[in-house]
Image (cartoon, rainbow, N blue to C red):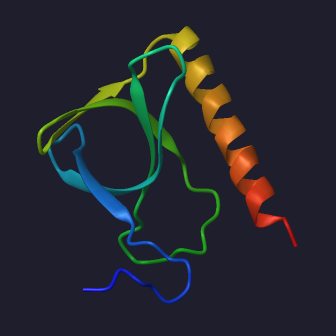
Amino acid sequence: MSKDRIGNEEEPEIIYIPDEEGNEEEFEVIMKFEVDGSDAKYMMVVPLDSDGNEEEESEEVYAFRYEEDGDDLKLYTIESDEEWEIVEETFNTLVDEFDGEDNND
């Protein structure tokens, strides 16, 4: 099978995260990255709107530290301000680099 795709769209990675009541909510993984000098891996996710409305640009972005154990994915909330600052700085740097690639016209 060929992996050629029409356009530049990749299949989004979807994960399911249970809420406080145990109901699974759908999230799309928008970015995964590792922080330099650390073994920690992070992912940024956005909730998928159940009614399919993708025009909302004010979606909240959630960050989690994660570990992969075979096919199992373990998510951890980021609780320290120090860790948040590192994640936010790395995320912003990656977004700036990504935006720069798009604007090479």
Residue furthest to the bottom = 6
Residue shown at 60%/68% (left/top)? 56
Q: Is residue 83 left or right of residue 69?
A: right
- The quadrant holding residue 69 is top left
Q: Is residue 71 above or below residue 50?
A: above
Question: Which of 77 and 31 lies nearest the eye of the viewer?
Answer: 31
x, y percent for residue 11:
38, 72
The image quadrant where one finds the N terminus is: bottom left
The image quadrant where one finds the C terminus is: bottom right
Residue shown at 39%/29% (left/top)? 41
x, y percent for residue 12:
39, 66
Question: Which of 36 and 83 lies nearest the eye of the viewer?
Answer: 36
Q: Is residue 40 above or below residue 44?
A: above
Question: Which of 81 and 92 lies nearest the eye of the viewer?
Answer: 92
Residue shown at 39%/21% (left/top)? 40
Q: Is residue 38 above or below residue 17?
A: above
- The quadrant holding residue 88 is top right
Q: Is residue 92 left or right of residue 19?
A: right
Residue furthest to the front = 2
Q: How many marks?
A: 0
Q: Is residue 60 left or right of residue 13?
A: right
Residue shown at 42%/21% (left/top)? 78
Q: Is residue 53 above or below residue 7?
A: above
